[in-house]
């Protein structure tokens, strides 16, 4: 047995985990599936998570919330299985899993943990597992905790308030309280953005913000599952609550005062064979096929009467993939196809009928004798599709067979196809016998979303679109076509409406930027809880977010208000102006007030300036941080990275300009000088002093005026205005804290 002490470097660590026999035992079996780099990454990231959890050996009241972010279908279950083993090595006696909102997800988690940690293990009595325990199991759980082998008790739980409250009652019972005392308990919330967060957050915070008679005890509403999780956490004196999700928008943006708000985070690295959004929408966009607008089904606006041509083509592409991958090359035992048309159950039934009729018709035709005109026509259709789609990616080096070589296998693929309609809880809870056939077609909608594993998914047909703005986390959870598909990626296809393709491209940009930002900032305080989004997307559902969520466009001009940190900002500006050779803006205008200078600096220097320049209000500080983050993104992640930022010294010959300010809001009424078109003194206005090839930052020097007595009256300050060209326009969403500490006031 190898014992290794891990040394995380972050100051956020609670303790240093030790790798012991349980993690080593799991690791021996995982090495059949992971190469050395992947295994090392798993161990490192698992240690990163656990080191942010409470020290289970300290018998004292403590709790922590940690966020773990993976990709959709990328192996989050493997991560929390490894976390379980490492937690067991380090003294955690109980691990609880909030395993999804549906029974099939609960069963899936229980079976996976049993297989990976108990059945396949070389260790005896290392773990004991319970599913949805009630108070009848109190004494049995207590007895397991008393075993001399000190097993770790695993409890899988349906994410439903009734089951969670019953478990809370178990922890409140005297036998468990006495036996466990203040030993550490690990709570793993799988798909933590679903159901766990408070559905009344928006309504509560809006009422609190607008009502003078808010009562914290009587007016604060909690959704039932959220309240039950708080109840469970309150029943366990020493616990860590680890949120797992591929869509962290909700947990990142909920109020920082919320008890489920994370204080630290880990970003998981997918395995080398993972194919996610970047693979489909950036690296291999030909895998995505646009469904024509007139074939996009909508039960109100476009209720199709006949199966669309694109559905038929998608089925043919899929059948050819089965013939090639499973029957000719034997790369996989089976493949599957998903048809996700609309959340209306009647629409899923209609598409199920269409798919069944097409398969039945092809089966009948392929049983006809050679030379029959119907069979010849069908062979011709398949041949055209094969030659169009197969040659997109497969080359001579792939030993791609001719159509005649696989023609006989097409009938085998069709005859061995099972079609499943998944539109109810019972449908979703009935396990698909994947290995019983070489081909499976699943038709459904929301039941095929989050958590439902469609194994070996090759072709997705999803003619579904949202008329308004889509939620970023919702559309991502529909991506069952992500996963480990490198062995047959060239035969994968995703059929989507054009608008949906644009949304997914935008989402991939958002996801990659968000993951990079999270990776580069170990503390969520540094992350500033900001998300950059395309304007077509909302971050998440509105009801879980606080009322004071800020959504701001980074487009056009934004004047800032630096009425704090006056002297430090003067030095920042003075040093910046002295260090750079500003040149005259062309053209120059007549008066001192309208003469400006410009200098272009590197993105790094612009970020350094913004970092040093201070604001005393939350909105401007958030904008500054978002701009820094946006500059980093534009300079490194975009296809045409920017290399510079323009700084413009406004009215450089003037001692200052006079500007009125509001003493209540501490905002300048109007920073910009307006247009002048009279006589010879024409001036386009300050807003036209800009360039369009990159972000521009104007430096203003103003003397503050006000018609009231105020300590700032007569003060000369430096402030800035930022211009975001339309070509770079985006939106950022961030949560405004209930209390804001101004940046280093003078």
Image (cartoon, grey):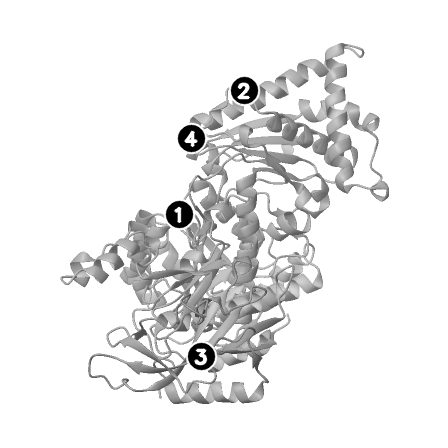
Pointer 4 residue: 344
Label of residue 306 in the image? 2
Q: Earlier in the sequence, mark 2 or mark 3?
A: 2
At x 27%, y 73%, the residue is 665
Foreground residue, 49 or 706? 706
Pointer 1 residue: 158
Q: Position of residue 452 (x, y in %)?
A: 51, 42
Decide: few, some or many residues near mark 3? Use Cα within 10 Å; few <14, some 14-19, many ≥20.
Answer: few
Q: CA distance from mark 2 to mark 3?
A: 71 Å
Pointer 3 residue: 591
* Left or right: 332, with 86 as reference point: right
Q: CA distance from mark 4 to mark 2?
A: 17 Å
**Given the current orientation, which residue lies at the most extreme front position?**
679
Q: Position of residue 680 (x, y in %)?
A: 45, 70
Q: CA distance from mark 4 to mark 3?
A: 67 Å
Q: Earlier in the sequence, mark 4 or mark 1?
A: 1
Identify the image quadrant of the C terminus. Answer: bottom left
Mark 4 vs mark 2: give the one in front.
2
Q: Earlier in the sequence, mark 1 or mark 3?
A: 1
SS class of the residue under badge 2?
A: loop
């Amino acid at each position: 047995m190898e014992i290794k002490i891990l040394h995380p470097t972050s100051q956020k660590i609670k303790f240093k985990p030790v790798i012991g026999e349980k993690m080593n035992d799991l690791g021996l079996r995982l090495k059949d599936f992971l190469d050395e780099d992947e295994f090392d990454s798993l161990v490192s990231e698992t240690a990163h998570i656990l080191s942010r959890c409470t020290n289970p050996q300290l018998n004292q009241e403590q709790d922590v919330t940690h966020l773990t972010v993976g990709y959709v279908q990328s192996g989050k279950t493997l991560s929390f299985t490894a976390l379980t083993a490492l937690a067991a090595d380090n003294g955690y006696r109980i691990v609880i899993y909030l395993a999804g909102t549906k029974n099939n997800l609960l069963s899936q988690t229980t079976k996976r943990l049993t297989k990976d940690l108990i059945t396949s293990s070389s260790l005896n009595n290392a773990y004991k597992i319970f599913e949805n325990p009630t108070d009848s199991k109190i004494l049995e759980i207590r007895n397991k905790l008393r075993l001399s082998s000190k097993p770790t008790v695993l409890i899988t739980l349906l994410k439903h308030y009734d089951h969670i409250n019953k478990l809370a009652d178990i922890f409140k019972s005297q036998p468990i309280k006495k036996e466990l005392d203040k030993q550490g308990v690990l709570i793993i919330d799988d798909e933590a953005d679903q159901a766990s967060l408070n559905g009344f957050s928006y309504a509560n915070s809006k009422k609190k913000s607008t009502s003078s008679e808010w009562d914290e005890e009587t007016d604060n509403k909690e959704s039932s599952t959220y309240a039950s999780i708080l109840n469970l956490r309150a029943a366990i004196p020493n616990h860590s609550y680890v949120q797992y999700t591929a869509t962290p928008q909700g947990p990142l943006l909920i109020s920082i005062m919320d008890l489920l708000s994370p204080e630290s985070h880990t970003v998981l690295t997918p395995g080398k064979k993972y194919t996610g959004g970047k693979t489909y929408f950036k690296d291999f966009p030909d895998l995505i096929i646009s469904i024509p607008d007139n074939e996009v089904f909508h039960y109100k606006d476009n209720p199709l009467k006949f199966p669309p041509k694109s559905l038929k083509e998608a089925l043919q592409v899929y059948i050819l993939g089965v013939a090639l991958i499973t029957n000719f090359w034997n790369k996989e035992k089976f493949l599957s196809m998903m048809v996700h048309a609309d959340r209306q159950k009647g629409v899923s039934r209609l598409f199920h009928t269409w798919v069944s009729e097409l398969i039945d018709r092809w089966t009948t035709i392929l049983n006809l004798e050679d030379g029959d005109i119907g069979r010849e026509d069908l062979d011709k259709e398949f041949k055209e599709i094969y030659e169009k789609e197969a040659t997109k990616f497969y080359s001579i080096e792939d030993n791609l067979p001719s159509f005649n070589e696989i023609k006989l296998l097409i009938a085998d693929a069709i005859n061995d196809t099972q079609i499943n309609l998944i539109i109810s809880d019972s449908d979703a809870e009935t396990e698909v016998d994947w290995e019983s056939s070489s081909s499976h077609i699943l038709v459904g909608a929301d039941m095929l979303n989050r958590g439902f594993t469609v194994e070996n998914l090759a072709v997705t047909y999803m003619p579904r679109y949202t008329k308004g703005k889509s939620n970023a986390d919702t559309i991502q959870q529909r991506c069952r076509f992500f996963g480990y598909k490198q062995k047959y990626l060239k035969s994968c296809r995703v059929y989507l409406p054009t608008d949906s393709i644009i949304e997914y491209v935008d989402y991939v940009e958002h996801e990659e930027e968000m993951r990079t930002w999270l990776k580069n900032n170990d503390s969520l305080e540094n992350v500033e809880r900001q998300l950059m989004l395309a304007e077509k997307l909302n971050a998440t559902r509105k009801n879980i977010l606080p009322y004071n969520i800020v959504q701001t466009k980074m487009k056009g001009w934004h004047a800032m208000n630096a009425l704090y940190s006056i002297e430090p900002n003067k030095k920042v500006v003075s040093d910046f102006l002295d260090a750079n050779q500003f040149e005259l803006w062309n053209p120059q205008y007549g008066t001192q007030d309208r003469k400006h200078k410009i200098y272009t600096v590197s993105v790094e220097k612009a970020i350094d300036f913004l970092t040093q320049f201070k604001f005393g209000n939350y909105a401007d500080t958030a904008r500054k941080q978002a701009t820094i983050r946006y500059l980093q993104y534009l300079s490194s992640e975009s296809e045409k990275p920017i290399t510079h930022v323009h700084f413009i010294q406004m009215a450089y010959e003037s001692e200052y300009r006079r500007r009125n300010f509001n003493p209540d809001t501490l905002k300048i009424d109007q920073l910009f000088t307006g247009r002048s078109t009279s006589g010879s003194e024409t001036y386009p206005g300050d807003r036209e002093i800009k360039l369009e090839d990159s972000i521009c930052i104007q430096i203003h020097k103003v003397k503050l005026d006000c018609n009231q007595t105020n300590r700032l009256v007569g003060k000369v300050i430096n402030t800035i205005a930022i211009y975001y060209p339309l070509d770079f326009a985006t939106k950022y969403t961030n949560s405004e804290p209930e209390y804001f500490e101004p940046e280093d006031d003078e």
